Amino acid sequence: MSEDSEKKDSGSEDEKETKEPLEDSAGAPLEEALKDPGLETIKKYLPLMLVIVVVVLVAFFFFRWKASSDEEAEWAMGMEFRQASQDQNVTALEAFAVKYPNEVLAGIALYEAADVQYHNGEFSQAAENFSKAIPLLANIETHQSLLGSATLGHGVSLIRSGDFEQGKALLLGAAENMDFLPSVRAKSWYLLGINALSEDDESAYERSASALKADELPVFEDLSKELESRKTQFDRQASATTRDKINFAQKNLRFLAENKVKQDVNSTASGLQYQILTEGNGTKPQLNDRVEVHFHGTLIDGDLFNSSVERGKPEVLTVSSPQLSAGFLIKGLTEGLQLMKTGGKRRFFIPSDLAYGEKGLPPYVEPGAALVIEVELLRILPPPTPPKPAPVPTPVPNDMQPNPGPGTDQNATTPQLQPDKKPSETEGNATKPLPEGKDGK
């Protein structure tokens, strides 16, 4: 019986041993030790990690596609610019700048379009495109050379188109801008000097010449020598022109002096000379009259400058301010027309100071030229009929003004509207047509 008890005890102990978990050498449960914490974490966060991987892959391929698309767009834009630039096509270059207004190439396209227009003599259009290119090029540090050239081109284009003051101001700004290339600054001083020679502005020329001499860079030295050479040529040409003017003036004076002593030539105190070809039998025009004439005007050598006879149509002149060409008075004709009679014809020899003077009438009449003008006085025109004065409204007496009805504001400018009222039977009969067959017929 004791043996059975021992067996039971030993059996119960074996059960206890099998039920209790196994332990490792450190005393920890062996089952817990065999678990991998990293693997459990991966299992826990695996869905999130998969989402992140997918997002990264999508972003990677998207940006790769975007970069590829941008590269293709830039390549297409570059090819479009290259084609327009090679063809020197102003329209295509301007269209490119409109299509890509924020791109670096837009400023370069406008610059090239302006350069083509300048060399084609389209100075106003060139100035406009240079002005558009400048702000675009100013934002690009790597294109300061083009910015200087565009400023230079803008200034010269304005001068060539007639805007001298603004053009000279731009050239002066380019000449003094130390951020521009030396070649741009030197060229600006040089062009300012050339312009000063054409305007006979000695102080402006000296300023440009001094600025070129003050810089020792080769480009400044070369343009300084060129400016001095141009000054020498200009002085020679000016001297020759002065001699030509003197000779021309002497030739005209000699002609008038020789003509004056001819038997059939009459002279006035002002120096006007004339021949009577036909006396005429009408009245003489007064200073404020308008006359209809035929004329034929030449220089003393017979070169024609204006003729109503050649055009086949008479001209209407005001005696006080006769203008054979718009804006150019001939004082000698004011005196000569008052010497004539209607139906008469005279040949006038008019000194330069009574004709177009020292300014001349370019390109037909040189400065200082005497004129020979045959005039036939056809008729004196009646003075224009003055316009009829506007009728003055007659004021209406207060007692004749209509009496405002009830409900009308006396001080209002617009009568107040009356409420709609039903027309009376009489009013209705007066305005409504009678039914057919009831008119008594």
Image (cartoon, rainbow, N blue to C red):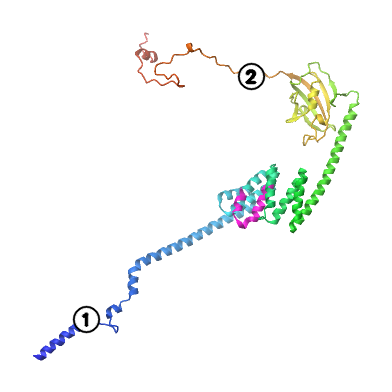
State the image coordinates of residue 397 (x, y, percent, origin top left). 50, 12
Instruction: Evaluate whether residue 122 shows in this view.
Output: no
Q: In the rendered picture of this protein, how many numbered marks are placed on residues?
A: 2
Q: At 68% across and 19% down in the image, what residue appears? A: 384
Q: Residues within 10 Å of mark 2 (few under 14, many from 20)?
A: few
Residue 20 tag number: 1
**Mark 1 vs mark 2, CA separation in Å:** 133 Å
State the image coordinates of residue 380 (x, y, percent, origin top left). 75, 19
Q: At 37% across and 14% down in the image, what residue appears? A: 427
Residue positioned most to the top: 440
The quadrant of the image that shows the N terminus is bottom left
Residue type for callout 1: Glu
Question: Residue 262 versus residue 343: which sits nearer the camera?
Answer: 262
| Mark sitting earlier along the chain (1/2) | 1
Residue of label 2: 387
Does residue 417 belong to the magenta stretch? no
Q: Is residue 391 left or right of residue 296?
A: left
Look at the numbered disc 1 and give the secondary structure of its residue: loop
State the image coordinates of residue 264 (x, y, percent, origin top left). 89, 23
Question: Residue 307 versus residue 205: which sits nearer the camera?
Answer: 205
Considering only vertical position in the picture, is 17 above or below 390?
below
